[in-house]
Amino acid sequence: MDLDSFRAEAHRIVERMADYLEGIEDFPVRSRLSPGAVAAQLPKAAPEAGEPMEAVLADVERIVLPGLTHWQHPRFFAYFPANSSPPAILAEMLTAAFAAQCMLWQTSPAATELETVVLDWLRQLVGLPAGFHGVIQDTASSATLCAVLMARERATGWRSDAEGLSGLPPLRIYASAEAHSSVEKAVRIAGLGRAGLRLVPVDAAWRLRPDALAAMIAADRAAGAVPAGVVATFGTTGLGALDPLAEIAAVCRREELLLHVDAAWAGSALLLPEVRELAHGLGEADSVVINPHKWLLTNFDCTAHWVRDPAALVRTLSVLPPYLRSAETGRVIDYRDWGVPLGRRFRALKLWFVLRSYGAAALRAKLRADIAMAADAAARLAALPGIEVVTRSLALVVFRHVPQPLAGDAAALDAHNRALVERINADGRIYLTPGVCDGGAVIRLATGGTWTRPRHIAEAVAVIAELAGAPA
Ligand SMILES: *Cc1c(COP(=O)(O)O)cnc(C)c1O
């Protein structure tokens, strides 16, 4: 494709992008296709002769769009949101055109220095103290893996780095029983084994119990294991629990354990002073992760990761072959040493566009509106006959339907709620996620979508009432 054609096609595609977002409410939120339906429409091999862009775009409409679950739909309330926004999309377009590979400072000084500066802006906005150094990782899972690897190396004095883990006493990482699956994945990838992850019991609000953490650490030491680190969660995925960071940090300090705080979802809300009140002790962590790609209007992927001791992270991850040496090595930040992949996209650009285009005040207003919409959803749901709101944390509402004839029959209630959420999602007007609370089936409704407005909350509650047979 020559540049004249590119120019013409690009203008047309921008029109299609705006049309898509403008008309997104006409789609069912969750794709209605069955497994294999997309693949069955595609040729088995790539074309030998090039095709016109118009033919490719026609197939986007015909084959791809029906196979999409529309994450930017204003009635998407499943999982957590994966925010995008017009400024972030524009930045992604530029990033694609620059197509810079930002592994070293030298391979694009602007990418490295913008990343450092923009993450320092965000550090200030979320109230992390000076002394934290930022890097953009692809996902929170990667950030947590880096933190667990750092904990492993610190706990063994970098002996595991030199010799491997065999011959060393077993290492232990602690997280609450409500922690995200990425913690277990990180512990297993780090070579600590499933036994290396110790799940700490939670209190009545599903928060990690610091007393139980201290007891487990003592028992593990007595048994000859080496406690290495704790992953605390600020905003668990299932129920939105906010672990008591100050008490956990005190245990970590006393026991000399690395503290990583997984604030992947709720961390964006730390822009709000009233939410920072709930995160006392955050500044005492060694490592903190927040996903602007969840709830801060920045297209996936963009994970903000701050560490207090970048030298420890670099010592854990750096490998320096001759072809990656540059005249500046050691004098500049080479972000390749701060994460697992060598190659890196220019991800700072979109976060910069978002922070500049909206400004902190508008981002705070968005977050407050999202939280208010969740509070509204919780109030409306609680007013429906048979609906129990189990918990509401920031922009997450967790509920279940307890029809009178089933009350007291746990197995029947579980089956009923699992069937209800599937019925709701198959209907297509809204999209929710099933969950589990204290062993029972529940339903999660997360607000925070870029285009979700109060009327969509009223519509969602009406759909739930209708399909649960619980008319308001
Ligand atoms: C979503 C989520 C993650 C995983 O985020 P990725 O960026 O997809 O790896 C981790 N922890 C929590 C608490 C989450 O909600």
Image (tube, rainbow, N blue to C red):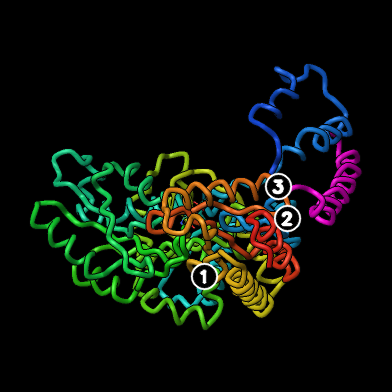
Q: Amino acid at mark 1?
A: Arg
Decide if residue 138 is in sight here: no
Q: Horizontal placement of 373 versus 156: left or right?
A: right
The x, y position of residue 458, in whole percent, is 72, 68
Determine the CA span between mark 1 and mark 2. 22 Å
Residue 6: mark: none
Image position of 266 (left or right of 148): right
| Label placed on residue 392 | 1
Q: Mark 1: few, some, or many residues within 10 Å (few <14, many ≥20)?
A: many
Q: Position of residue 68 (x, y in %)?
A: 71, 42
Viewport quadrant of the N terminus: top right
- Quadrant where the image shows the C terminus: bottom right
Determine crowd level at label 2: few under 14, some 14-19, many 20+ residues with C-alpha closer than 10 A: many
Q: Which residue is mark 2?
A: 73
Q: Which mark is residue 427?
A: 3
Residues 420 and 303: in front is 420
Q: In the figure, residue 43 lies in which quadrant? A: top right
Is 175 in the magenta? Answer: no
User: What's the distance in space between the residues labelled 3 and 1, CA to CA?
Assistant: 25 Å
**Could you give the CA–CA distance between mark 3 and mark 2, rounded to whole angstroms?**
15 Å
> Start and end of the magenta stretch?
1-29
